[in-house]
Image (cartoon, helix red, strand yellow):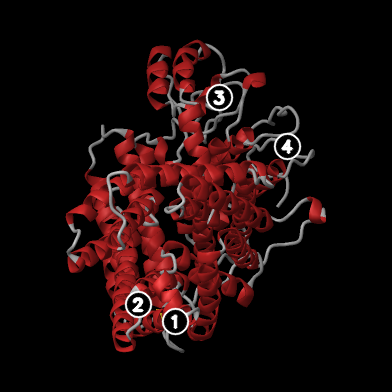
Amino acid sequence: MIDPGGVQWRVAVRTVIAAVAALLLTDAVVRSARLPGGMVVIATVLAVLLSRSLHATSLPHRLSALVYVPAIGIAAAFTGRFMLGHAVLGAAAFVAAVAASRYLMRFGGTVRRLGRLALTPLVSVLVVPVPPSAARATGPMWGGVAGLVAVVCVVTVTAVLPTRPAREAAAAARDVLRAATRLRALPVDAPGRVRARAVRDLHRAALTVEDRMAAARLPEGADHGPLDALSAAVLRVEVLAADTGTARGDRATGAPLGDDVPAPGADRWTAALAAVRTHAAAVRATPAREWPAADPPAARRSARGWRDPQPQTRLTAQLAAAMAAAFAVGHLAFPHRWTWTVITAFVVCSAARSRGDVVHRSGLRVAGAFTGAIIGTLVAHLVAGEAPLAVVVILGFLLAGVWLRDVTYAAWAFCVTSMLAVLYTMDGERGAALLVQRPEGILLGSACGIAAACFVLPLRTETVLRGRAARALHVLQDLLGAARADEPQPAEIRRLARAFDRATRDLTQAAAPARAHRSLIHRSLSHRLRTRVPAALDQPLPLLAPAADPATGPASGDGRSPGSGSGSGKGADRRGLLARVPRPRAARQAAPANDRATHAADWADALASCAPAIRAIAAGDTAELVASRPQLGLAALNTGQVRRRLGHRPDAEPPRRARGGPPHLVRLNAALADLYDRLPGDGPVRQPPAPATAPAAG
């Protein structure tokens, strides 16, 4: 499921409409004033970039862009004009302007918004270099005119075609129904990957429903009941889907091996889906506008001062170094087509989160841009001389790129590079040599970005992952506290459960480079695991041993594996375990304690695997929460130990697994113990205590 509810498709359509409006309006201005046509392209590119920058912002912020963007556009145009006659000084001024704008984004509120808006005219000058004829005819003022036209078009389209979050939530709820229907229709012996993909599609659609309802601003005095009812109904469907996967032994839903959970009956499924359908219709009829997106808070000052710069400061220095190197290399290697190198260096470093993210984005950009440069150049030759057809092709690439941008960056890189190839061909660039020179420029720009990320104040990927994991665990601690309150509030617990889902989504996005590294570098672990697990089955396995029924206690003497298990013989256990091995992750489970290398992607995935159990907690009623208070207290204690382990505190103790209680709480405590074991620590991991029936405190 690419786009639940069609949310990104609507954003892409509004972006293209704003771009077309800017193109037509600027063309009319250019024709009436007899100005060069370069302004048309600049205004169109600005409209595309501003559509993303001004999306989900307040009306005062959009109106303030009418002042900020033209003023910065004049400065950007002057810088671009200066680069025509003074390449070195102009490049230095451009890099300084981009670095200053990027540095402003380390602050919060208005200053951050100003920094983001300031980057827009600068990037447009980089994407579409200042035409010499335009520079001579109008001077720097053309940048201000293009910026004003772009902002007017974006603000007008946003006002005429406003976002309707309630309708989008209802549309995403229909996608929840489709995903749940496909999941139920899967046969019992369906491959694990197929079932995991269906579960991911269902969760993505459900989280889209929650995001759009959170953005809905109802009229004063309006009833929030339909939104709360739809939230509870969607959550219930997700929990039923997780129970279905658990009953069928699906590890993709986060259940430990051996849990004996009955599959939900057809009546429960029918009632849950009917509730989603009914409440989605009520939400669709609810009038609502969109709340402006909240500004991220300003970064905290580092305790070590200048000796330990903040992440935003590090990323700003890396961006400046990468662009300076790209200007130098680009002018030396491609004197007339250096823009491809500089654009690539800017793209891979401007939105990077860490050193690994720069490498990952570079790989995606190289893959997408290489293909886009070749395809775009070939398409440009087919539409050469047909300006209207070329414009249609450019808008088609733009629509697809904006729509698929959040799906994969490679698709965005492909569409943008193809679009620029057609645009540059319209501007006079031709020749078969471009098929080689454009990919070469992209490769050199990526190399500049990677070198800057690795050698200029590098920011480790694991540091970023630990920060996001800490936020997720903090939300989990708040949720467990709310669930153990004297009078639990189901709506508040659901809100915290979805906050945990969003935190793990952020963690998953930041862990993409680590996951790619694990797939590429640690691929051989799968083969070693297949040869080591059969021999290790004769010894007690802390995490893969047969589990115990909550009512009868652990199945093995070490007491490390709660749940339910049935001893069906060593041969059957061996076949079942080998079929469930999740490749490199379980290699450390079967390895000796002194040979357990931990990969950051493993513990990030382990934290994300807690989400199904947390959603099951949020779906329970007040009576269930009160009855489960001892197990919730144990989960809170275990969460605290994991947070200590994450922070490298020496007083961290291994979590205790629950001996009994609701299955989802047994799975949550087992997942927290698994997460603790996967987190790298400063010393040897101490042996865990015996399974507990109740927490020591709270």
Q: Disc 2 vs disc 1: Cβ atoms closer than 8 Å? A: yes
Specify whether 272 is left or right of 139.
left
Report which residue position mark 3 lands on.
589
Q: Earlier in the sequence, mark 4 or mark 3?
A: 3
Nearer the observer: mark 4 or 3; the answer is 3
State left or right for residue 135 relative to residue 673.
left
Q: Which residue is mark 1?
A: 138
Give the amino acid type for the residue marked by disc 4 in the picture.
Answer: Glu
In front: mark 3 or mark 2? 2
Tell me the crowding category of disc 1: few under 14, some 14 to 19, or many 20 or more residues within 10 angstroms, Cα based: few
Label whose residue precedes the other's in the sequence (3 or 1):
1
Residue 218: image x %, image y %? Answer: 42, 83
Q: Is residue 15 above or below residue 560?
A: below
Q: Is residue 570 above or below residue 510?
A: above
Earlier sequence position, callout 2 versus callout 1:
2
Residue that carries the numbered disc 4 in the rendered image: 653
Q: Is residue 151 left or right of residue 23?
A: right
- Identify the element where label 4 is drawn: loop
Q: Residue visible at 59% across and 44% down?
A: 355
The Cα–Cα distance between marks 1 and 4, rounded to whole angstroms, is: 70 Å
Q: Identify the element where label 1 is drawn.
A: helix
Viewer can see residue 667? no
In space, the residues marked 3 and 1 are separated at their CA atoms by 69 Å
Answer with the quarter of the image where residue 269 lies. bottom left
Circles 4 and 2: CB atoms closer than 8 Å = no
Q: Secondary structure at mark 3?
A: helix
Q: Residue at x 42, y 86 (%)?
A: 222
Q: Is residue 342 above or below residue 81?
A: above
Say which of marks 3 and 1 sits in front. Answer: 1
Q: Which mark is residue 36?
A: 2
